[in-house]
Image (cartoon, rainbow, N blue to C red):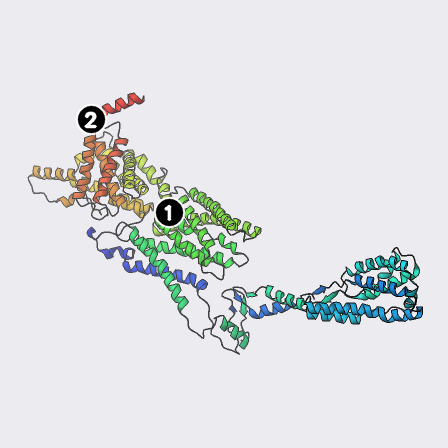
């Protein structure tokens, strides 16, 4: 549906076409598109800088342009984490059950020595038993130091506890110990060991608390002899000491780990760093300077990078459009302006979604109707251009919808936009009904949700389950929003820019349209002729890559002007007397050529799009009315006077065909009328007639102002022959040598 720039051979002055074909306007539009790209991407790619000084008050609120690490807050969080670390303790097994056994063995040996009096034994026990217990524990500390089994801080803590928590055995116990027999001691050993082991297996910070449990354990033991019970109780209390000690090194290590495990604190993008009117302290000024938010240094590199990126995108689009056309620039400036508006609408939709996005809710970006641009370009301009624009939309979306602070492009959104855009183009580029757009939106929703699901799986479940469900829901809703917006915007673009989309053409082909109903009821012959021309022209146009649907619908309306004087055209006379037989040839000529002008006026009155009007106006071009010219010559000869007219007086006023579609409809119009005029047409007659019509128009320079090539004319000729054979099959007489194989074939197949 792209219109071509008129050829200079048209005889029209190029400037008469105004801004639509102005090269200056064209490149101005591309410059505007580049500016649009620059403005839309600058907030994402260019760092903000502020002109402020120390010890002054900020004139504006300063927000974080990106995620910025806050070292001061991080240090504070680390100290708070270290303060919350609980003291670390170490359990040191002293094997105190061996000390109990050693003390009871010493008592047994000394009690059996009859050379020592009982009072002397009491004195020995009073001095020796506490000393042995202290020496045992201190020797344990000393050996641990020499073997480096525990840290010095830990052993110092243990040694201090040993000295602080020494138990004093009552005096009466030392008096009772010499009375114990060997049998008593044998019974006492397992009981004492069991109690010590049981208590020392617990974590003991305070020995006094553990000693308080000894009496209860002794009372439920197997010992029955009172003295033995009392001695076991006191000796056990003596050997029990703390085994849980504060580990300074482990505590410090835990504090270090707590500091290291404290996550970096960030100032999130968009978070207020400096309030309006806040004093800029030296510390705050240094912080802003470290994050390159001050204008004390001029750095144009980001601006240069963005400018080069924008230039690359814009120049790429310009080059694609320039070299994608068969000749010259493919689109006029009105269509380029529409393309700029489509980009603006798509970028605005992305920006609205990005405004709602946060680091915690990146999935909101899937709500943007990103496929709207590709869908509009496919239906209003060209499917090939739509595929190229989809790549640009994907690049823009990967920047605008990106919430990752350490990357410029977000592959997730870029890939998502590319997929849904291609699906939208595939689903709607041949849309013939408005409902097809809704179906296309549903397709976009389904494939968008599928794409999001695939990406979530490939990312290894980076998103939480709830976030993934939100992303799926937003992507599905985005497709429906796309369909609604496209349905709403299509009439605006069609009306404002005179664009004939496939949807509009299908609507205009409805037989219930007032003009087509008028054509059918008032000029049934012309209506039938127009339908046949539509079939022929559509086939020929599609064969050369032109717009077949436009040719068909244009054919329906191309002779609408005949409804003003229907009986002056042979297809509507139905055996009645031809009125041209009784009027002057010049008048006949005026009536015949007027149907093109009358048709254009009627089409304007009913507000039909310009491409349809152009076909009605241009399908005859400036062709020559041979019959009426020669009739006028004969009348002049009969009167014996010189003709006061020339051949130019018996030509259509034009203009000549400005597009392939107008030229094809004109050829099909002549072919259909010529074939219909033959009573018993043969294949050779039809072929010769089609070739003659095309050659005569070519020789008459009727194709000079459109870009039809000789090769395309040959294709049109061949296609029209095939189509005419199919449509008028029953009327065309085939040569005998062509009929016989068909009969034989029918006999075989039948």
Task: Say if 589 sits above or below 390 in the image.
Answer: above
Q: Which of 348 and 610 is in front in this view?
A: 348
Q: Nearer the viewer, residue 188 or 534?
A: 188
Total label count?
2
Q: As drawn, is 632 to the left or to the right of 187?
A: left
Circle 1 residue? 379
Residue 529 is situated, as x and y percent measured from the top left of the image, at 27, 35
What SS does tag 2 mark? loop
Q: Which of marks 2 and 1 is in front?
A: 2
Q: Residue 17 appears in which quarter of the rendering?
A: bottom left
Residue in view at x 20 percent, y 36 percent: 690
Task: Say if 526 sits above or below 279 in the image.
Answer: above
Residue 185 shows in the view: yes
- Mark carried by residue 735: 2
Q: As drawn, is 738 to the left or to the right of 635?
A: right
Residue 162 is situated, as x and y percent measured from the top left of the image, at 78, 69
* Earlier-in-chain disc, 2 versus 1: 1
Residue 130 is situated, as x and y percent measured from the top left of the image, at 84, 69
Is the C terminus in the top left, top right, bottom left or bottom right quadrant?
top left
Task: Say if 182 sits above or below 50 in the image.
Answer: above
- Mark carried by residue 330: none
Q: How many residues crowd mark 2 within 10 Å: few (<14), some (14–19), many (20+)?
A: few
């Amino acid at each position: 549906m792209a219109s071509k720039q008129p050829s200079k051979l048209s005889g029209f002055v190029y400037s008469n076409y105004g801004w639509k074909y102005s090269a200056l306007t064209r490149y101005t539009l591309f410059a505007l598109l580049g500016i649009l790209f620059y403005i839309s991407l600058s907030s994402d790619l260019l760092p903000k800088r502020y002109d402020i000084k120390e010890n002054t008050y900020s004139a504006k609120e300063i927000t974080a342009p990106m995620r910025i690490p806050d070292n001061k807050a991080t240090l504070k969080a680390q100290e708070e984490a270290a303060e919350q670390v609980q003291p670390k303790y170490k359990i040191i097994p002293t094997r105190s059950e061996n000390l109990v056994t050693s003390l009871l063995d010493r008592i047994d040996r000394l009690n059996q020595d009859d050379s020592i009096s009982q009072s002397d034994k009491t004195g020995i026990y009073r001095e020796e038993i506490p000393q042995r217990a202290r020496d045992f524990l201190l020797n344990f500390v000393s050996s641990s130091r020499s073997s480096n089994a525990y840290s010095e801080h830990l052993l110092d803590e243990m040694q201090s506890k040993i000295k602080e928590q020494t138990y004093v055995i009552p005096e009466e116990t030392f008096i009772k110990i010499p009375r114990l027999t060997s049998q008593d001691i044998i019974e006492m050993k397992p009981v004492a060991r069991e109690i010590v082991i049981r208590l020392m297996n617990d974590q003991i910070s305070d020995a006094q608390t553990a000693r308080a449990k000894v009496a209860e354990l002794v009372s439920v033991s197997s010992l029955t002899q009172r003295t033995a019970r009392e001695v076991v109780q006191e000796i056990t209390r003596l050997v029990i000491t703390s085994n849980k000690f504060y580990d300074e090194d482990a505590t410090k290590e835990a504090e270090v780990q707590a500091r290291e495990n404290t996550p970096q604190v960030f100032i999130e993008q968009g978070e207020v760093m400096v309030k309006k009117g806040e004093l800029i302290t030296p510390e705050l000024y240094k912080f802003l300077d470290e994050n390159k938010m001050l204008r004390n240094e001029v750095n144009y590199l980001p601006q240069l990078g963005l400018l080069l990126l924008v230039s690359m995108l814009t120049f790429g689009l310009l080059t694609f459009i320039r070299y994608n056309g068969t000749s010259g620039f493919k689109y006029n400036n009105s269509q380029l302006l529409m393309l700029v508006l489509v980009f603006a609408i798509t970028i605005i939709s992305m920006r609205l979604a990005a405004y709602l996005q946060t680091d915690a809710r990146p999935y909101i970006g899937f709500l943007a109707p990103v496929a709207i641009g590709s869908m509009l370009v496919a239906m209003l301009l060209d499917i090939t251009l739509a595929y190229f624009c989809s790549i640009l939309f994907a690049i823009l979306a990967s920047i605008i919808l990106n919430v990752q602070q350490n990357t410029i492009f977000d592959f997730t959104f870029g890939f998502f936009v590319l997929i849904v855009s291609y699906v939208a183009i595939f689903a709607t580029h041949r849309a013939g009904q408005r409902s097809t757009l809704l179906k296309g939106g549903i397709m976009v929703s389904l494939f968008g949700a599928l794409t999001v699901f695939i990406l979530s799986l490939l990312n290894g479940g980076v998103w939480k389950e709830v976030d993934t469900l939100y992303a799926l829901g937003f992507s599905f809703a985005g497709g429906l929003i796309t369909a609604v917006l496209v349905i709403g915007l299509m009439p605006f673009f069609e009306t404002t820019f005179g664009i004939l989309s496939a949807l509009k053409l299908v609507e205009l082909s409805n037989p219930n349209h007032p003009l087509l109903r008028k054509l059918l009821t008032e000029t049934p012959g012309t209506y039938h002729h127009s339908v046949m021309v539509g079939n022929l022209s559509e086939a020929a146009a599609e064969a050369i890559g032109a717009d077949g649907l436009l040719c068909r619908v244009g054919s329906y309306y191309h002779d609408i002007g005949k409804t003003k004087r229907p009986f002056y055209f042979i297809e509507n006379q139905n055996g009645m007397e031809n009125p041209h037989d009784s009027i002057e040839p010049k008048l006949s000529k005026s009536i015949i050529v007027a149907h093109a002008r009358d048709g254009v006026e009627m089409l304007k009155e009913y507000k039909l799009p310009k491409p349809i009007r152009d076909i009605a106006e241009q399908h005859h071009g400036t062709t020559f009315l041979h019959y009426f010219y020669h009739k006028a010559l004969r009348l002049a000869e009969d009167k014996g006077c010189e003709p006061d007219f020339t051949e130019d007086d018996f030509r259509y006023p034009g203009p000549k065909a400005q597009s392939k579609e107008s030229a094809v409809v004109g050829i099909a119009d002549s072919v259909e009328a010529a074939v219909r005029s033959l009573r018993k047409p043969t294949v050779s007659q039809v072929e010769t007639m089609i070739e003659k019509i095309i050659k005569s128009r070519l020789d008459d320079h009727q194709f000079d102002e459109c870009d039809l090539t000789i090769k395309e004319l040959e294709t049109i000729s061949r296609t029209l022959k095939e189509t005419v054979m199919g449509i008028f099959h029953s009327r065309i007489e085939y040569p005998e040598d062509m009929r016989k194989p068909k009969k034989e074939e029918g006999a075989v197949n039948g």
